[in-house]
Image (cartoon, helix red, strand yellow):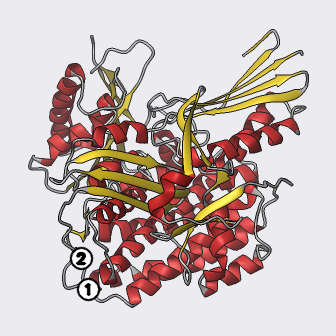
């Protein structure tokens, strides 16, 4: 068993810190064989984190046009949320990481992306109340997935009802 | 989106978190009248956030400004606080800092060369498409990046936001065996870095040069990375402690990023081209030979060829890392005591994308009264805009798609620190009759 959980985000951008907040909640739990990591989402680092992994769970923030802060989306690899290429920065993103991993044959057996709708990504510390509550729910769900004897059967796309 | 006389081009795709970066070009009667690169700059927030905090906190807090160059922020902060407290760090601890910084240069340069900039030159939309045709090349880039990453993990505790760095040195110093584990990958990385120089030197580069004054830290005898004295290619030099006298920042209406200029001089450029101009005589053997073979002996003023200079610096960083590992003797103590005292301190290091200045003011009890951070992107912004103005003017006959691509490539020459705050850049070209 070689499982990896990656929390993507910047805790100094308020709700953008939901990924690191979820992995922080998981660090206190008994999850043998699970590597837990923070990441800024940069493609090369993501690939390194999930190289040779069986199951990878990525938790990230997502901004939508009409957000319901705290709503959790789950996508399996068969339904990747592929983003575009940043124009002029020294970073690249999760979508590029998924596609590059696919091209290089580095995809894990299962890649689950949990995306939490956020509203406040201004500078500052602390999650908004609904996003903090989502981090609690999500940490519990991710822990359950990791304890599942066969998480690879998890598939499909889900979205919390609001 | 096209309506009436305006033309709008959107550069990037979806963003994980919506950002604030944008580029606007205004064209009046066939002439580029204005180019504005809009950047939201995170250090301004961090300067305010640091006020009132303990003097020991900036290395951890400022590391969060940038996921790609945390070491630059950490070591500029350490240096400034140590300066305020009248402490100098030397010996093996200073060597470890330089080694750590080499790791950051390797990782950052490999990322920029392979994943971001090379696809532009080879006609690919991005690294994914490049990998489909040239898997071995992308794998080489990832291996280089990993070699740099490994240094950060061994010395910094982890690659993202290293946690082992403190004012005065490190919480724990590695033993020789721990550093020796890095050697095999770095030895392979040296071959990969040299191959990188040869590869990128063969790209086709637009015929474009700049005449900006160039500023970098200089440390006679070796290629400046984690310390040095600011100097320009036109002869200006000043101690780091006087940077606020010489580096002036001003607000401009179109950006929350401050624009920097040199007092009495004007705009200036920092980064690989500036470092190479001022320190190339101190490159290591393999890096110097690679630079010569790449045709860089006469210097380099073409920003598009910065990818070649980055590859040379990548080679240097790998060679320097190997040298430091081979000569390493663990320090008796992993850090120097830095007792707080009232005062001001200044620090400057060479982040992968340019000189990074820090200044802190401490109260006697070690509480920070003020902080100032002058990142390379704000220093380069006026030069980037000037280059883009001339670059776009010669390409106004291009269609939207091609012009957008070319502008992206031109902006990437400077590896601007946009992604720290934003993952999104809009390019808008407004064309209107006179």
**Mark closer to the chain start, 1 or 2:** 2
Indicate the secondary structure of the residue bearing disc 2. loop
C-alpha separation, residue under disc 1 versus residue under disc 2:
7 Å
Please, which chain is the residue tagged with disc 2 on?
B
In depth, the one of A156 and B422 nearer the eye is B422
- Residue A105, can we see it? no
The answer to whether mark 1 and mark 2 are in CB contact below 8 A is yes
Disc number placed over residue B149 in the picture, else none: none
Same chain under badges 1 and 2? The reply is yes
- Residue B296: % across, % down: 76, 73
In depth, the one of B207 and B11 nearer the eye is B207
Label 2 neighbour load within 10 Å: few <14, some 14-19, many 20+? many
In depth, the one of B184 and B35 nearer the eye is B35
Indicate the quadrant containing the N terminus of chain B: top left, top right, bottom left or bottom right. top right
When asked about the image quadrant of residue A74, the answer is top left
- Residue B236: % across, % down: 64, 64
- Above/below status of B144 relative to B266: below
Disc number placed over residue B330 in the picture, else none: 1
Indicate the secondary structure of the residue bearing disc 1. loop
Label 1 neighbour load within 10 Å: few <14, some 14-19, many 20+? some
Q: Residue at x 22, y 38 (%)?
A: A21
Indicate the quadrant containing the C terminus of chain B: top left, top right, bottom left or bottom right. top right
- Residue B106, can we see it? yes
Please, which chain is the residue tagged with disc 1 on?
B
Disc number placed over residue B173 in the picture, else none: 2
- Residue B33: % across, % down: 81, 28
Left or right: where B246 falls relative to B118:
left
- Residue B131: % across, % down: 62, 55
Q: Residue at x 21, y 45 (%)?
A: B53
């Amino acid at each position: 068993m070689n499982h990896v959980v990656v929390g993507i985000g910047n805790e100094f951008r308020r709700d953008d810190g939901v990924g690191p907040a979820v992995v922080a909640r998981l660090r206190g739990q008994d999850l043998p064989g699970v590597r837990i990591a923070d990441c800024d989402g940069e493609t090369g680092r993501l690939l390194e984190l999930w190289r040779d992994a069986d199951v990878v769970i990525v938790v990230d923030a997502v901004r939508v046009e009409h957000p319901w802060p705290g709503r959790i989306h789950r996508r399996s690899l068969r339904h990747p949320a592929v983003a575009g290429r940043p124009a002029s920065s020294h970073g690249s993103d999760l979508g590029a990481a998924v596609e590059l991993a696919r091209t290089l044959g580095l995809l894990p057996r299962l890649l689950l992306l949990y995306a939490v709708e956020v509203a406040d990504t201004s500078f500052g510390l602390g999650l908004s109340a609904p996003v903090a509550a989502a981090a609690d729910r999500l940490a519990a769900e991710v822990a359950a997935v990791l304890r599942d004897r066969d998480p690879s059967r998890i598939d499909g796309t889900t979205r919390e009802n609001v | 989106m096209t309506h009436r006389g305006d033309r709008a081009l959107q550069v990037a795709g979806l963003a994980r978190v919506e950002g604030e970066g944008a580029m606007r070009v205004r064209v009046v009667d066939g002439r580029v009248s204005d180019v504005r690169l809009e950047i939201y700059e995170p250090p301004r927030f961090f300067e305010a956030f640091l006020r009132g905090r303990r003097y020991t906190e900036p290395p951890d807090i400022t590391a969060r400004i940038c996921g790609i160059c945390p070491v630059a922020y950490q070591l500029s902060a350490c240096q400034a606080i140590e300066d305020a407290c009248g402490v100098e760090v030397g010996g093996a601890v200073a060597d470890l800092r330089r080694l750590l910084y080499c790791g950051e240069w390797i990782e950052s340069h490999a990322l920029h060369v392979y994943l971001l900039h090379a696809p532009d030159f080879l006609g690919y939309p991005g690294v994914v498409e490049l990998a489909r045709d040239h898997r071995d090349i992308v794998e080489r880039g990832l291996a280089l990046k990993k070699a740099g990453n490994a240094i950060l993990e061994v010395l910094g505790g982890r690659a993202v936001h290293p946690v082992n760095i403190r004012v005065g040195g490190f919480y724990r110093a590695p033993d020789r065996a721990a550093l020796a584990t890095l050697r095999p990958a770095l030895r392979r990385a040296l071959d990969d870095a040299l191959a990188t120089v040869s590869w990128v030197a063969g790209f086709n580069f637009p015929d474009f040069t700049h005449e900006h004054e160039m500023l970098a830290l200089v440390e006679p005898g070796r290629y400046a990375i984690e310390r040095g004295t600011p100097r320009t290619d036109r002869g200006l030099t000043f101690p780091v402690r006087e940077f606020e006298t010489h580096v002036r920042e001003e607000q401009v209406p179109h950006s929350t990023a401050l624009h920097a200029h040199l007092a009495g001089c004007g705009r200036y450029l920092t980064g690989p081209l500036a470092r190479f101009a001022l320190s190339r005589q101190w490159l290591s053997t393999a890096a110097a030979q690679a630079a010569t073979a790449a045709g860089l002996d006469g210097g380099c003023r073409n920003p598009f060829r910065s990818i070649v200079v980055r590859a040379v610096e990548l080679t240097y960083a790998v060679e320097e890392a190997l040298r430091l590992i081979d000569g390493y003797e663990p320090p008796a103590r992993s850090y120097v005591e830095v007792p707080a005292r009232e005062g001001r301190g200044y620090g400057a290091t060479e982040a992968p994308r340019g000189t990074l200045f820090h200044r802190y003011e401490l109260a006697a009890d070690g509480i920070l009264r003020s902080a100032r951070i002058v990142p390379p992107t704000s220093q380069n912004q006026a030069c980037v805009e000037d280059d883009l103005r001339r670059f776009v003017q010669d390409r106004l006959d291009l269609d939207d798609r091609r012009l957008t691509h070319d502008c992206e490539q031109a902006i990437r020459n400077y590896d601007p620190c946009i992604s720290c705050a934003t993952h999104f850049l809009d390019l808008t070209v407004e064309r209107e009759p006179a």
